[in-house]
Image: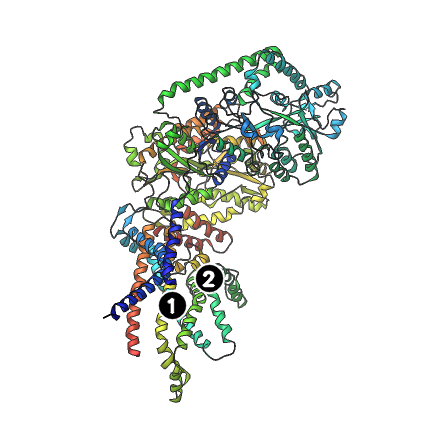
């Protein structure tokens, strides 16, 4: 009997198993929610990932390459009644006030009331409830900051200050000035406390300016301006380094922006930026009592959202400990648990604990939140200057501000009207916010590593906007390894993205991909494109994608390897460089001289073996699948590299200078800084050299193996089309957008293959003149930018004009060489053995 | 007349019961074997005659021709044959010798039997770790050489790389063969040995006259299994010296694995197909040879 039943039982179990496994997840009829973000907004990216993991609702992400486009698109779409479901507003938002005034957001009052968790003490309710408009909860602050004044207890007491745990108001600061606070020659405050900070401290938001009546401009604003001017006259305007000002006792108080944020003051304190100084912190209080936090990121729901409940769930997730404790969440979290976690990271000394205690007091003092938008801040910044310089009265300034705000409002309306006028053109520029339109569109797939390919993201946005029936679906990854694995696995599965945009070092061997027909031949598409002018592109770069007469990829960007130094450093080390004879042999002579002198000195901040390989005659013939690594040329390169390797500054030595290479150069330890040669790096390095060494940077091309062989470039980003793609022509259109438009707009990357784009970028850096803004050093400190010298541009132009070859990294070959090189440098094998092993292995690889 | 139909029904019932039970028990294994071996194999056969990832173009026998023109494939093929040529006879001799010893009546033999099985169950990564301790540049082997005033050796490079790999293969797989040989030796009736001794045969004569001839069917099986196992040493070879070891230790498994990562599925599939043909031919020949020889013995 049992024999009879076993098969039946197994059949039943199999049926149940198969029916369960084949039925898949239950049909989800819930409308998806749409989130917009910039490509570098890691916090939102991680939050979306988390939401996808924990919720059934589908999330459609739209990624923009820069904030202008992001805000422009969000504003336009919201005002037209479409757009993202969840909107995040931060201090850089353009047009945020107008959206609020136009009623683009849903009142979340009811949703918030019904949610017991969010109403709990686990969140900073004073901040979250502190921002209302028209008594409605259109936006919830999910992070905030509190302006603070810092001093040493001794200095603050000496002022006989009214400073207490409730903070210090501007009125109190003025009282201190009246009592002779400046008699000691010490300023009361530094000039980083702006008029905007003062408005926020008094609970005035930018919406007050748009909705402001005459009494606001004539009364409140004028009084504020007068108050600020009185304070401004007693400010120290010499330095913006608060630690230095307090140490030199040049100010009684220094303004600390974003003081409540564990990532700023406490982090600096913990890192020793304030030395052993014991700080006393006071929050910037309102003149009428209470403390207003500056709302940093606010979240709202689109009034026309098809799924407000899911949008609210997303906002709830943004408020959760998981999201708010992320490293990418850069302001003060409203979630108290996340706040404690972040504070806990930096409590590594007694002084830091004292600062943390002071910061905690801010929490209890907060009575509300205020927000000044980017647009209003710009107006205030422009208008107040004349008033502070005594060119205008407070009343005149108030009136000018009112006019500017009204004019800005009108401008906003005209943009809105224009966008409506174009609504008839939706056949060519469809509303990307419409979910219905999306479902009808054909989709191309693309993988991106999001940090490295902002121009590609920008091109996707442009393509999606102007393609009526086609959309590019981007799957971006936040780690290089993840990108490599995903790309390789999908190509291995015989699929892969339709459009291949990648850095060569992030994908499997490009040559193997070519041999295995992963790429489509672009020549067919180019030949049928009357608009494509090969003369518009750098020939040597463009043609590096040619293999046996077929064009498999186009290098979008390329780089040149450059050594940066200064004339003074070269002079001190008795080095003269003859650029017509700038070979590795000459570099070796310099190294030998340093070695003989027995100085504790290095030649380079970094140097790879590939830097030597770049300019040598190719050691691989991919077409013939032959190698010549076992030749004297290669053996000599190995020997040179081993000798030079001793003169590469170890990373731990650079770490001693906070990782700031310029400081290492300035100390005399290192002679050359290795970096890319392109306008943005030239601008950055020159600015940092001037900041840290007060010397202009000098650029030298990386030496070559033999003299007079020209310039050797490296392909940095390639664009190709998957041979299996059904949409090759559309993919080609995308590549054209990338090459023609997006590369030109991406100023912060290596050089574009298109000459016009390079000229535009170059002109941008030339035209900055004396107004070069700020840049960051490798430690994250902001320093003044210095316009790129014409000599650098001339050098770059000369090198580019002289390019003889563009190399492309073959990851498999590089891995083989690197593995043997390690043994070689460790002395486990000599150069001949190493060359032979490399030759044998690469030959095997090529012939596989 | 009445009895026959009844018997037929019983037979059918019995047949059905047995068959269903058999299908039930072999079903899961058959499904697994089909899903993970037969279907992928048929799929990979398709790759042998196409070009491009995903198989976009039919190219006939071009992949086979291309493969035999590939330096790397020929090198891997040659190395694999050399490796098999060294390892298979060695493992048979060593395991047979140990099996003979383990069938003697010596105290504590059961413990030895257990020891020889242990390498089979130790994870490969752990085995490699020990092997590296022995053969690394500053390992035990080189230490000994230095103490004997002999220059240390690069064990993973040159011809030594094949020897190290062979040793590893023998050490790892010997236990399994020993079990088979012990079973084979134990199945020989003791009466044969007693008769031989009565006739004045010594131990050596018994070994060559009785043990070896009668254990040959087992030896054929061990040979086939050992030969097949030489095609499965990739894990060990990869962990010892990576994807691109010394050219002497570059085996077909390296070739196939590298082609997988180099996206050359056609080459991978074609070479796998050729290896399969080779193994099938060899097994077929061995069975023919065994049948013929077994008849001669009987």
Residue lying farthest to the left in this orientation: B1
**Is the residue under label 1 in contact with that under label 2 (CB below 8 Å)?**
no
Q: Disc 2 marks which residue? A: B155
Q: Secondary structure at mark 1?
A: helix
**Residue B158 percent across, percent down from the top left:** 42, 61
Q: Chain of mark 1?
A: B
Residue at left 49%, top 40%? A54
**Of residues A513 and A132, the one drawn nearer to the viewer in this rendering:** A132
The image quadrant of residue A418 is top left
Within 10 angstroms of label 2, few (less than 14), some, or many (20 or more) residues? many
Circles 2 and 1 on the same chain: yes
Q: Secondary structure at mark 2?
A: loop
- Residue A693 visible in the shown view: no
Of the 4 image quadrants, the one containing the N terminus of chain A is: bottom left
Within 10 angstroms of label 1, few (less than 14), some, or many (20 or more) residues? many
CA distance separating discs 2 and 1: 21 Å
**Of residues A605 and A596, the one drawn nearer to the viewer in this rendering:** A605
**Left or right, A74 with reference to A341:** left
**Residue B185 percent across, percent down from the top left:** 40, 77
Q: Disc 1 marks which residue? A: B88
The image quadrant of residue A122 is top right
């Amino acid at each position: 009997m049992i024999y009879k039943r076993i098969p039946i039982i197994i059949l039943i179990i199999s049926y149940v198993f198969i029916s369960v496994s084949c039925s898949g997840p239950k049909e989800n009829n819930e409308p998806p929610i749409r989130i917009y973000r910039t490509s570098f907004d890691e916090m939102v990216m991680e939050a979306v990932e988390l939401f996808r993991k924990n919720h059934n609702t589908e999330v459609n992400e739209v990624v923009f390459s820069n904030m202008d486009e992001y805000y422009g698109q969000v504003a336009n779409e919201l005002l037209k009644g479409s757009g993202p479901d969840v909107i995040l507003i931060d201090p850089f938002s353009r047009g945020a006030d107008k959206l609020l005034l136009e009623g683009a957001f849903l009142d979340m009052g009811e949703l918030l009331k019904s949610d017991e968790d969010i109403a709990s003490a686990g969140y900073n309710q004073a901040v979250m409830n502190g921002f209302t408009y028209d008594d409605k909860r259109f936006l919830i602050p999910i992070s905030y900051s509190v302006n603070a004044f810092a001093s040493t207890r001794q200095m603050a007491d000496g002022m006989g200050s009214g400073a207490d745990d409730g903070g210090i108001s501007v009125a109190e600061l003025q009282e201190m000035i009246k009592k002779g606070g400046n008699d000691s020659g010490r300023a009361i405050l530094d000039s980083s406390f702006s008029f905007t900070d003062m408005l926020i401290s008094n609970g005035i938001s930018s919406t007050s300016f748009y909705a402001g009546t005459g009494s606001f401009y004539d009364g409140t604003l004028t009084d504020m301006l007068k108050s600020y001017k009185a304070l401004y006259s007693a400010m120290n305007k010499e330095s913006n380094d608060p630690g230095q000002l307090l140490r030199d006792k040049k100010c009684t108080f220094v303004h600390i922006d974003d003081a409540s944020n564990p990532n700023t003051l406490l982090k600096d304190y913990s890192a020793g930026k304030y030395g052993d100084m014991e700080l006393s912190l006071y929050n910037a209080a309102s003149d009428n009592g209470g403390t207003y936090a500056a709302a940093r990121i606010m979240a709202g729901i689109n009034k026309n959202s098809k799924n407000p409940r899911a949008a609210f769930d997303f906002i709830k997730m943004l408020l959760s400990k998981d999201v708010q404790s992320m490293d990418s969440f850069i302001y003060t979290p409203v979630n108290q648990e996340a706040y404690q976690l972040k504070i806990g990271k930096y409590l590594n000394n007694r002084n830091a604990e004292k600062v943390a205690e002071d910061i905690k007091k801010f929490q209890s003092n907060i009575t509300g939140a205020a927000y000044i938008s980017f647009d209003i801040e710009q107006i205030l910044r422009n208008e107040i200057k004349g008033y502070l310089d005594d060119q205008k009265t407070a009343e005149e300034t108030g009136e000018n501000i009112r006019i500017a705000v009204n004019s800005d409002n009108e401008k906003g309306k005209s943009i809105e009207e224009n966008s409506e006028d174009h609504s008839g053109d939706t056949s060519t520029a469809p509303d990307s916010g419409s979910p219905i339109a999306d479902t009808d569109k054909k989709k191309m797939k693309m993988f991106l590593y999001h940090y490295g390919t902002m121009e590609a993201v920008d091109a996707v946005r442009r393509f999606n906007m102007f393609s009526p029936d086609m959309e590019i679906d981007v799957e971006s990854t936040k780690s290089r390894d993840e990108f490599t694995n995903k790309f390789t696995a999908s190509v291995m599965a015989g699929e892969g993205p339709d459009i291949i945009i990648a850095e060569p070092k992030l994908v499997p061997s490009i040559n193997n991909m070519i041999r295995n027909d992963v790429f489509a031949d672009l020549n067919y598409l180019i030949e049928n494109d009357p608009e494509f002018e090969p003369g518009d592109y750098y020939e040597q770069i463009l043609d590096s994608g040619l293999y046996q007469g077929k064009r498999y990829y186009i290098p979008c960007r390329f780089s040149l390897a450059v050594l940066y130094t200064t004339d003074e450093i070269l002079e001190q080390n008795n080095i003269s460089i003859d650029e017509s004879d700038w070979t590795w042999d000459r570099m070796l002579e310099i190294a030998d001289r340093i070695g003989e002198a027995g100085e504790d000195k290095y030649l380079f901040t970094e140097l790879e073996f590939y830097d030597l390989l770049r300019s040598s005659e190719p050691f691989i013939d991919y077409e013939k699948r032959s190698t010549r690594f076992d030749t004297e040329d290669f053996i000599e390169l190995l020997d040179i590299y081993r000798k030079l390797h001793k003169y590469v500054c170890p990373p731990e030595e650079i770490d001693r200078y906070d990782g700031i290479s310029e400081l290492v150069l300035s100390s005399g330890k290192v002679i050359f800084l290795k970096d890319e040669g392109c306008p943005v790096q030239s601008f950055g390095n020159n600015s940092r050299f001037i900041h840290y060494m007060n010397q202009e940077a000098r650029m030298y091309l990386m030496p070559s193996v033999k003299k007079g062989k020209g310039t050797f470039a490296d392909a940095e980003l390639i664009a190709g089309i998957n041979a299996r793609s059904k949409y090759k022509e559309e993919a080609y259109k995308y590549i054209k957008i990338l090459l023609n438009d997006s590369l030109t707009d991406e100023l912060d990357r290596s050089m574009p293959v298109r000459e016009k784009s390079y000229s535009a970028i170059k002109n941008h850096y030339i035209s900055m003149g004396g107004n070069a803004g700020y840049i960051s050093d490798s430690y994250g400190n902001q320093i003044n930018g210095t316009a790129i010298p014409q000599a650098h541009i001339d050098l770059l132009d000369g090198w580019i004009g002289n390019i003889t070859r563009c190399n492309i990294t073959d990851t498999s070959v590089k891995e083989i060489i690197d593995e043997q090189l390690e043994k070689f440098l460790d002395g486990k094998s000599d150069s001949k053995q190493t060359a032979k092993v490399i030759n044998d292995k690469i030959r095997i690889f090529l012939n596989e | 007349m009445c009895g026959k139909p009844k018997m037929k029904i019983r037979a059918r019932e019995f047949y059905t019961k047995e068959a269903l039970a058999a299908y039930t028990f072999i079903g899961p294994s058959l499904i697994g074997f089909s899903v993970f071996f037969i279907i992928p194999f048929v799929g990979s056969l398709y790759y042998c005659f196409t070009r491009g990832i995903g198989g976009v173009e039919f190219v006939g026998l071009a992949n086979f021709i291309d493969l035999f023109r590939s330096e790397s494939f020929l090198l891997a093929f040659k190395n694999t044959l050399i490796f098999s040529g060294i390892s298979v006879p060695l493992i048979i001799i060593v395991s047979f010798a140990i099996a003979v010893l383990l069938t003697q009546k010596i105290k504590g033999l059961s413990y030895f039997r257990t020891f020889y099985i242990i390498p089979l169950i130790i994870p490969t990564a752990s085995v490699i770790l020990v092997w590296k301790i022995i053969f690394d540049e500053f390992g035990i082997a080189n230490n000994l050489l230095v103490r004997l005033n002999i220059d240390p050796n690069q064990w993973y490079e040159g011809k030594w790389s094949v020897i190290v790999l062979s040793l590893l293969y023998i050490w790892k797989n010997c236990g399994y063969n020993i079990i088979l040989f012990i079973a084979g030796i134990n199945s020989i009736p003791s009466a044969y040995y007693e008769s031989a001794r009565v006739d004045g045969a010594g131990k050596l004569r018994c070994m060559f006259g009785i043990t070896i001839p009668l254990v040959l069917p087992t030896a054929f099986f061990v040979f086939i299994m050992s030969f097949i196992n030489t095609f499965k040493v990739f894990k060990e070879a990869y962990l010892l010296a990576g994807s691109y070891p010394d050219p002497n230790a570059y085996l077909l498994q390296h070739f196939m694995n590298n082609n997988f990562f180099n996206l050359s599925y056609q080459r991978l599939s074609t070479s796998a197909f050729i290896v399969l043909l080779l193994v099938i031919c060899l097994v077929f020949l061995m069975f023919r040879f065994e049948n013929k020889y077994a008849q001669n013995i009987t």
